[in-house]
Each structure stands twice: as C-alpha cells, then as structure tokens.
Amino acid sequence: MIAALALENITCTFVSPERRQQRYTAVKGASLTVAPGEFVSVVGPTGCGKTTLLNVAAGLLAPSSGSVRIHGEPLEGVNARAGYLFQSEALMPWRSAFGNVVAGLEFRGVAPREAAGSANDWLRRVGLAGFGDRYPHQLSGGMRKRVSLAQTLILDPEILLMDEPFAALDVQTRQLMENELLELWSADRKSVVFITHDLEEAISLSDRVVVLSAGPETRPIGEYRIDLPRPRDVSEIRLSPRFIEIHAEIWHAMKDEVLKGYAQQRQ
Amino acid sequence: MRSSGNSASLRAWQVLVLVGILAVWHVGTSPTLLPPLYFDDPHKAAFFFGEPLTVLSRIWNWLYGGEIYRHLWVTLVETVLAFAIGTLSGLAIGIWLALAPVASAVLDPYIKGLNAMPRLILAPIFFVWFGLGIASKVAIGVTLVFFIVFFNVYQGVREVSPVVLANARMLGASPRQLLRHVYLPSAMSWVFASLHNSVGLAFVGAVVGEYLGSSEGVGYLILQAEGTFDINTVFAGIVVLTAFALVLDWMVTLAEDRLMVWQPRSGETERI
C-alpha cells in the first residue's frame, strides 16, 4: 500500500538572516509515514520542531534535505491535497463565518450557488447554523475552531494536518471538540497528522502515536500502536485500564526527552 | 436611557462652547460694548479680528447670492481629486513595495528623503509644469496625501498575520487571490486610519495652492480679501472651508463604518 503521506529523512536547518553563521537545525533525519485513513499523533516536548515537520508536510516550508511524497508523488509547492488546521487564529477577520467557510471553494472557482449550499451545510455540521453572518471576533474560541474545521473540511482534503488545534481551548470545550473531530473523521476516514504536546489527547484520538526527541535536531524516537476500540469517547476512554497501560508505557519513553527539553529551555 | 441623556447634554455643552466663543468675539470686537482697553481707536479691534455678525452675513450673502459656489466647486474638485489620486497611488505603490523587498530596499532612502522634504516647496515647480489651473493644486495635494497613505499601507501589508496568510494559501488562494482577499483587506484598516488625516491635507494642498497663485477657488477669495484688509471675508472663507472639511471627514467615517464592520469595537454590549 502506498502511504498517503511520506516524509523521508527530513532535515530543516534555519539560518539567521542577520548572521549567516548562526544556524539552528530544528529537525534532523526525520521520517514519518501515514497510511490512507490512518490517524497519527505526533507528540514531543515543547519547542521540539513539531510545527516545522507539519509545515514541511503542508508544503509551506521547503526542507533543507529529504523528500516529501504525497500518495507516492513528490510534493512541489503548497500541498493541495492537504488541509491544515493551525494552532493560532487563522480565520480571515474581515470575513464572516460563512465567508471563511466558503473561501476555499471561492478560491477554487466553484459556482457561488453551489459553494454557498455546501458552506451552509458545513456550518450546520459543525453546529454553527445561524452563526454564518458573525465575524470571528463575535464568536467564542471554540466556535472559531469549529469554523476553522469547517473551512478546512469543506475542501474534502485527503490528508488533514492539525497543529495543536485545541490547545487554546478550555478542558470541557476541548473534549467536546475532540469527540466532534472523531465523529467527523470516522465518516470518511481521512489520513490525519495530529500534533500535540498532550499525551492523553494523542492516545485517545489516534491509531498510532509517534514520539519525537527533544530539539534541536529532532527525530522520531518511538512509535506506539494504539489498539483501543473505536468508536471512542475521549472523556470515557481515558479511564479504561488499557489506556492507562499505554499511557504509562509511552510516558516512560518520553520522560527523559521532556526533561531534556525542559533543561534546554531553562538555560 | 442614561447614555442618550448623556449625549443630549454633551451636545448642549458643545453648542454652549460655540455660543461662548462667538459671544466673547462679538463683545470684544464691537466698538460700543466695551470701553477701549488696548486699542486707541474703538474700531481697531474689529479691523484686526473681524466681527462675527459681519462674518455670518458675508457667508449668508455668498450662499444666497451664489458667488461662492463657483469657487467652492473648484476647491472641492481639487481636494477630491488630490484625495482620490493620492490615496489610490499610495495604496498601489504601498502594496507593491511591501511585497517586493528588493525594490523596497533600493528605494528606501529616496522615500525617506521625499517624506522628510517640506513638500509645499514643490509648489513653484508644479506651477511651471501644470500651470495655474486645477492641475497644479491637485499635484500639491497628491504629494501630501500620498505619503500618509503609502506608509500606512506599507505597514499594513507587512503586518498581515503570517498564519492567516498560510491558511489562505493552504485553502488554495493564488497570488492574485491572496492580494485581493488577504493583503488588501488587512491593509484597509490601516488605510482608513490614515484617511481622516489625508482629507485634511488634501484641503491644505488645494487652498495653499490657490493661495500661492490662482484665479478661482476659496483660497483665491481669501487672498483677495486679505489684499484689501477685509478680515471679515477671510474669516468667512475659513469657516466655509472648515465646514466642508468636516463634511468630507464625515463621509470618510461613513465609508469606514460600512467597510470595517468586521473590526471588533470595545463596548459592544447593550444595556437593557
């Protein structure tokens, strides 16, 4: 089977624009493959280059070396087969919720009537029917995330890249959003790369968890298959014995890296 | 209810300030109401400061007699043209330079120099190039308006949120669509912040241009009156210009309210 997304031996070195000798290698020799329909979470200590890796997969950042293949084809430019859910606010503040959801179809030149129908349908699916004319600043953080989700999913991407999308939400909203995400995902099983620093979130959502080493020169140091049954309820599954077992196993492997990352940041 | 009561009393206070100023002006310049304190001749105060009633009657005569409209029209055309051309060119060049780092780096010292230059001294050159008609006044106004809008657009485009930009790219926006749907709207909030300044400066360009050499326009009227020491007509011209500057500023506010509905405002809660 051809992987939906294959990162092969990716290295990203950033050069300071002022002093060209000053270099920072965020990611070194990292490889990651995601099968079609697979939900993969990537966890790692803060500042370890998770977002860098995701930007490479999105085609927003060209790696210093290594290759990106999407369904076997080398990636050039922005990854048109992927949708990206950003960590921080990414909605266009000058467009209403409806305007934001419809934007992708508009950019693609879909007929306005058809695009509007689809946008209204997606607003309803994320529970925001009747909020279409609100501007982002008039919506709560959770509602804005739902708009982002609809904005991305309306284009029906084959690969979904998510960068700590729920990190800024409160715990209750977050669990609701996680369940909604699982529900939407199970409807048409896209390939998902889900970046998070929250191990519980990673385990409860994923088929597979990839653990990254502390930065710089980040690379994957472990892979864990999550054999918890689906469909899952994220708040209930956290209490199951198998979940706790997996959590302990991965945390044991991660702990050293987290401490390493923490020590580096304190310097 | 409280807030509407507040705004009514605020209006009353504002009118009261105006009435107070007019009253002081009237009493101070009338030859009979006060004994001469400073000037030996009781008519001298009126000569230097004008009289509010005469100024009002002058304005009334202008508006009623129709003499002013031709001049007002010329000044307004100059102002609006300078405002429109300055704003559009500032917008276009601001966006271009913000998106072209090499060109912007090359041109940087020249732009700084042009901005630092007291640009009204270009007036004689514009008179030579464009003659004494409308065009030279428009050119002066454009040099004033352009830089304000330009710097604001430049800043606005450079401060576009990189995440919003990356998101639009992931949603499939072409470079052209990025310009239309991301850079332009983002720059517009900066542009509107600068338009209130620009309207005033477009007026300055038009009137100063007329003042330096022209045969029509409100600035020309003021210059004529000054030539015959008719201080009342000078004040009347100033009042008329101020009124029209306020009207233009109000129109910018209207456009801003319509186009900038997406911007958060503080205190959007409603008291029930």
Image (tube, coloured by chain):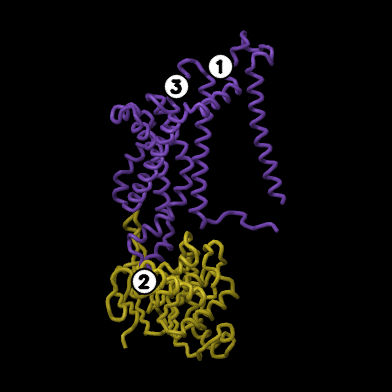
Chain colours: A yellow, B purple
List the residue tagged with mark 1. Answer: B48
**Amino acid bearing label 1:** Phe
Check disc 3 and report its element: helix, strand or loop. Answer: helix
Looking at this view, name the residue that lies furthest to the top.
Answer: B40
List the residue tagged with mark 2. Answer: A58
Spatial CA span between label 3 and label 2: 66 Å
Of all chains, the one bearing label 3 is B
State the image coordinates of residue A223 (x, y, percent, origin top left): 42, 84
Q: Is residue A9 left or right of residue B73?
A: left
Spatial CA span between label 1 and label 3: 16 Å
- Foreground mark, 1 or 2, reads 1
Q: Earlier in the sequence, mark 1 or mark 3?
A: 1
Q: Residues within 10 Å of mark 1 (few under 14, many from 20)?
A: few
Residue in the foreground of this view, choosing between A222 and A117: A117
Q: Is residue B265 left or right of residue B139?
A: right
Residue in the foreground of this view, choosing between A249 and B250: B250
Seen in the picture, residue A83 relative to B44 is either above or below; the reply is below
List the residue tagged with mark 3. Answer: B223
Q: Residues within 10 Å of mark 2 (few under 14, many from 20)?
A: many
State the image coordinates of residue A184 (x, y, percent, origin top left): 48, 81
**Amino acid bearing label 2:** Ala
Of all chains, the one bearing label 1 is B
Q: Quadrant of residue A49?
A: bottom left
Of all chains, the one bearing label 2 is A
